[in-house]
Image (cartoon, rainbow, N blue to C red):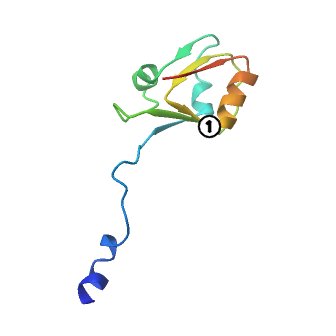
Amino acid sequence: MRMIKGLPMKRGFTNTFKTEYALVQLDMLELFDAGDRITPEVLRERGLIREKGMPVKVLANGELTKAVTVAAHKFSQAARAKIEAAGGSVEEL
C-alpha cells in the first residue's frame, strides 16, 4: 500500500493507441488569402503548427470570412460548416 501511495502518477490507464492531433483554429486560417489551398505542409512552413508528422485537426474557434480550400486529416462539424458557409471547401486527407 505504501508504494501505491508514493507513486500516484502510476495509477490509471494510458491508451498507447490514441491519436494525437496538431490543432488549428479558424482564426489561424484567416491569415491566408482568399482562394488559397491550405495543407499541413503550408501550415508548418508558416509556423502555425510545430509538430512535424502529426495529423492536423481543424477546430471552429473564431470566424472565417474568406473562401479557402482546407486540406486536413480531421474537421469538427462546426468548423466544416463555417468553412463551407464562407464559400470555401474541405478536403479530408
Q: Is residue 40 left or right of residue 60?
A: left
Residue 53 at x, y = what percent?
34, 31
Residue toward you, 1 or 25: 1
Q: Quadrant of residue 47?
A: top left
**Does 12 appear above or below 48?**
below
Number of labelled discs? Answer: 1
Give the residue furthest to the left.
3
In this orientation, which residue lies closer to the viewer: 12 or 84? 12
Q: Element type at marker 1?
A: loop
Q: Position of residue 66 (x, y in %)?
A: 69, 18
Give x and y (percent) for residue 21: 45, 40
Q: What residue appears at the point 31 percent right and 84 percent down from the top-left corner? A: 5
Identity of the residue drawn at 65% across and 39% down: 61
Q: Residues within 10 Å of mark 1 (few under 14, many from 20)?
A: few
In this orientation, which residue lies closer to the viewer: 45 or 91? Answer: 91
Q: Quadrant of residue 62?
A: top right
Q: Is residue 59 left or right of residue 56?
A: right
| Residue 66 against residue 77 in the figure, above or below | above
Q: Quadrant of the N terminus?
A: bottom left
The image position of residue 13, as x and y in percent, is 37, 65
Residue at the bottom extreme, as displayed: 1
Q: Residue furthest top?
A: 35
Q: Amino acid at mark 1?
A: Ser
Picture layout, residue 57 above or below residue 83: below
The residue identified by callout 1 is: 76
